[in-house]
Amino acid sequence: MAETEKTPVPKTKKQVFWDVVKTLLKISFTSLLLYLVLRKMDFNFVKKTLSQANPLYLLLALLTFFVSQLIASSRLLSFFKSIHLKLNFRFNLRLYLLGLFYNLFLPGGIGGDGYKIWLLNKSYKLPAKKVFWAIFFDRLSGLWAIGLITVSLIIFIPQLKQFNIPISIPPSVFVVGTLAYYFVAHRFFKDYTHHFIEAHIKAIIVQSLQVITVLFILLALHFNGKYSPYLFTFLVSSLSAIVPITVGGLGAREYIFTNFAPLFNMDTNLAVVVSLLFYLTSAVISLLGIYYVFNTSRLQEGLPKEDKLKEEETLPKE
């Protein structure tokens, strides 16, 4: 196994420098956004709201988010299957949890997706580019699901009528975008579409469970108003987590909630508390991945042995 355990090439000074710069920029931007948000907060309200929160609903939010990540790891597995990368479900879940930890708590360096690409390329001799595109389409399916649920919520938000946009426009744009998305994927990335529908059904389940997570958080805070503006804003703010310009989306999501609050007649303080509690929920689940940072042997259970891998390479592809 000398080849599979080969030490990765160390980074150059220039690469290390830019990693440090990117990390500092993320931390600085996150801090700036949090400052802009927190300066508008009523901390007495926040303290009172949190002290009266229902722990049962917070626990349900935690469990729901965890289940969403189980499905999300299975969704990624669907794209891996499309490129004949047949991973053990438990190994894939361990790798997924480690990726969550890297992405949320280690904003610099290789990152969760980068580590997956490196490890799978090293262990399965699969081109890094193929693994990258599988992960890319996994993220894209999540983005598509966010769009679907967001469009579905629009009819429940009367405040959007002030923009004079016909109610038929958003769903029409989404349908056209979906058709274009599938055409491009099937035409130019056919290898990644063998389990396309299966993966996108899982994407809908993942995003739906995360919406339910926010619902449980609102219930934990004894909210009894209109839920749809908070859920709509949450979905829009989720897009900020996809762009890696902050630490795990912290600050960006809260900033969007702050600016959408007056637009949709939401309580700004409550909106920010909901967003922060969702971040903390995701952080608690992501912390599960730290176990595999210190137990790499446990992480790599399920990886193929060298002789087994060579045997599989001689078999015809499906």
Image: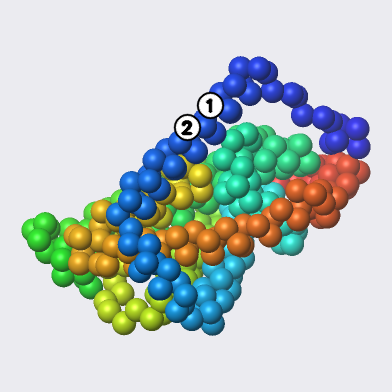
Q: Identify the residue at horizontal 57%, vertical 58% (top origin).
A: 283
Q: Identify the residue at horizontal 34%, vertical 79% (top origin).
A: 223
Residue located beneath label 1 in the image:
21
The location of residue 180, given as percent across then percent down, is 33, 48
State the mark number for residue 25: 2
Q: Is residue 202 visible?
A: no
Q: Is residue 146 visible?
A: yes
The location of residue 272, given as percent across then percent down, is 37, 61
Under mark 1, the amino acid is Val
Local crowd size for mark 2, using a 10 Å CA cut-off: few (<14), some (14–19), many (≥20): some
The location of residue 172, given as percent across then percent down, is 22, 58
Q: Identify the residue at horizontal 41%, vertical 61% (top origin).
A: 275
Local crowd size for mark 1, using a 10 Å CA cut-off: few (<14), some (14–19), many (≥20): few
- The coloring applied to the image is rainbow
Q: Is residue 291 above or below residue 231?
A: above
Label 1 secondary element? helix
The location of residue 219, given as percent across then percent down, is 41, 79
- Position of 142 compared to 285: left or right? left
Under mark 2, the amino acid is Leu
Q: CA distance from mark 1 to mark 2?
A: 6 Å
Q: Is residue 59 above or below residue 73?
A: below
State the mark number for residue 184: none
Quadrant (top left/top right/bottom left/bottom right) for the N terminus? top right
Q: Is residue 3 above or below residue 232?
A: above
Q: Nearer the viewer, residue 109 or 265?
A: 265
Q: Are marks 1 and 2 in contact (CB under 8 Å)?
A: yes
